[in-house]
Amino acid sequence: MLAAPYQGGGYKLNCVRCGLFEIGHIAASEISVWNSQQRINLSGWIRDNQNCQIFGPNVKILANLPNLTVGEKAEKILVQFAKKFPKPGEIADLSGGAHLEFMAAGRLADTNELRFFIRDYLYAEVGFLLRHELVTNLGDDSRYSISPKGWVFLDSFRHGNPDSQIGFIAMWFHDSVKAAQIAIENGVSDAGYKPFRVDQKEHNNDITDEIIAGIRGSKFLVADLTGHRNGVYYEAGFAKGLGLEVVWLCRESDKKDRHFDIEHLNCIFWDGDKLPELTKALTNRIVATIGRGLLIEKN
């Protein structure tokens, strides 16, 4: 890891595993006492957000980054292959230290886990990678390229669901924002889409599975940051990874506490006493950025 001091009171780092980022002294001190899983998750987050800045006020949020499912880890590793080797047929050589960034991308603990995802999962099970044998320190598992099947998956993965008529709503499900929930649903339906809130769906599955399935089946996601729930940030990030458009909302009184990564994004701010304006603004934003849906009547 290469480090250079800068005037902000910390360091600019170029880590073989994580990539490029800046970190302040206070943040570094707090992170030093984290457990191994928290550090693994942070490493993956940095790999996804190159040239990011990590300072004291952001550490609490980063300490609670969610763990990935097996499928999410595999997807992130495949996406990293495409980022690093974007030319079809190009062979990735994971010998030496080249494999470390793939461990970061998948938020993996060790090379045994990486071998499982690359050899057993992406190559042998789903066929998204092709293996080019060469004996190295990783055995015969160090040279791979993305298969035609893998490129087809990545193409659909990036472009989302153009034919879907569903708008997924990610927000704080609390009594204090019940009226806003209705206003947001009205905004989605007025734009011609069916609003989907996972708390309204009856199911017997794990709630995380239902959320992931719901996002995958949607055309776009509405993320209301009111209450600053970690799950909302996670769901919005997952949707962006799928290539879905995200419409950002936030109650005016919560504006100052937004996560530092999205402060620059165009966000609709709303007031609890002016919810019809929220509905109208959301409808206009959806129509302008995504297009009007085909469901004329409200659901």
Image (cartoon, rainbow, N blue to C red):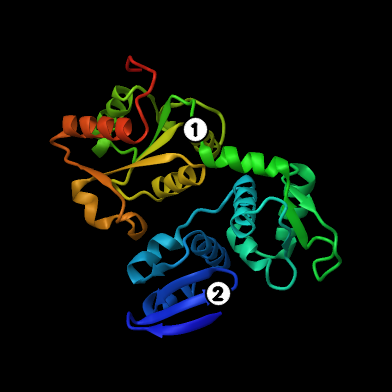
Residue at image position (28%, 35%) is 285
Q: Can the viewer see residue 152 in this picture?
A: yes
The picture quadrant where one finds residue 44 is bottom right
**Height in image: 7 above or below 87?**
below
- Name the mark on residue 49: none
Which residue appears farthest toward the left when viewing the image? 273
Drawn side of residue 121 relative to residue 160, left or right:
right
**Residue to which mark 1 is pinned:** 214
The number of numbered badges drawn on the structure is 2
Quadrant of the image containing the N terminus: bottom right
Residue toward you, 168 or 242: 242
Q: Height in image: 19 above or below 121?
A: below
Query: Which mark sits nearer the N-terminus, 2 or 1?
Result: 2
Residue situated in front as seen by the camera: 118 or 65 = 118
Which residue ends up furthest to the bottom in the rendered image? 5
Which residue occupies the foreground of this view, 231 or 205? 231
Residue that numbered label 2 is attached to: 15
x then y, percent, for residue 297: 33, 14
